[in-house]
Image: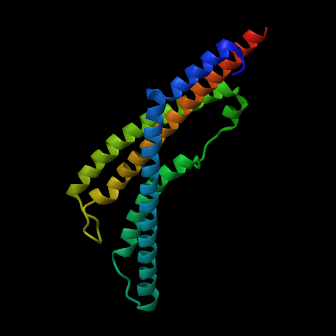
Amino acid sequence: MGGGPWARRLAERGRLLRKGLFFRTCRAVELISERADRLAAAMGIVLVAVMTFVVLLQVVFRYIVRAALPWPEELARFLMVWCAFVGASSALRAGEHVGVTFLVEKLPKPVGRVVKLIIKAIMFYFMVILIKHSYRIAQLGWRSKSGAMLLPMFYPRVGVTIGSVLMQIQLVDLIFKDLAAIVGARSASDAQGGQEVMSS
């Protein structure tokens, strides 16, 4: 193996690091993230299908039967809330949320990685607050019912909490990936610096 003993020690340290607790945790978090994304995708398909059926049903009854039903519009609104928050987790995982990135892209790569990590940490804290307060508001919904369906408002409101939990799972995965990128980049720079020292 080329590069001398210093490079071999760095490579061995990199292998041990990849086998260590941090990278095992990264793989576990990634697996949980993938399963949460599959759950969100399945829920999104069901929600959109039901919402489409409900809207079409209302169109038929309103314009063909000439006797509009009282509940489809209300149910469609509730399903839209669920779709928005459940789908937001998949969008977060894919990096599809709207964001201003040109400032971060102008920074040097190591600094940019740290800035992205700080942004995700702030988002993580915000999601903790959102989960806490949205669930508290959802619990208050047991005391009130919707106008047309007489459905406890807990069920429409808890969609915000469930979607926020799914987003929180994706944020944890993204944070670990950023940390892994920072550690990997640092190891690579150390190895390059060691090779330069050995060659000089």
Residue 97: give x, y in percent of width and height. Answer: 57, 48
Residue 20: give x, y in percent of width and height. Answer: 46, 26
Please identify the residue farthest to the front as the structure is shown.
1
Side (left or right) of 124 relative to 94 = left
Q: Nearer the viewer, residue 99 or 41?
A: 41
Q: Can you say whether 177 is above or below 59 in the image?
A: above
Q: Residue at x 30, y 47 (%)?
A: 135
Q: Nearer the viewer, residue 90 or 9?
A: 9
Side (left or right) of 158 relative to 45 = left
Q: Quadrant of the N terminus?
A: top right
Q: Nearer the viewer, residue 128 or 176?
A: 176
Q: Where, by quadrant of the figure, is residue 117 drawn?
A: top right
Q: Where, by quadrant of the figure, is residue 14 drawn?
A: top right
Residue 177: give x, y in percent of width and height. Answer: 54, 35
Residue 7: give x, y in percent of width and height. Answer: 66, 17
Please identify the residue farthest to the left as the structure is shown.
143
Q: Residue at x 29, y 51 (%)?
A: 138
Side (left or right) of 30 relative to 190 = left
Q: Nearer the viewer, residue 179 or 19?
A: 19
Q: Can you say whether 73 is above or below 33 in the image?
A: below
Q: Residue at x 38, y 83 (%)?
A: 68
Side (left or right) of 79 relative to 193 = left
Q: Where, by quadrant of the figure, is residue 57 drawn?
A: bottom left
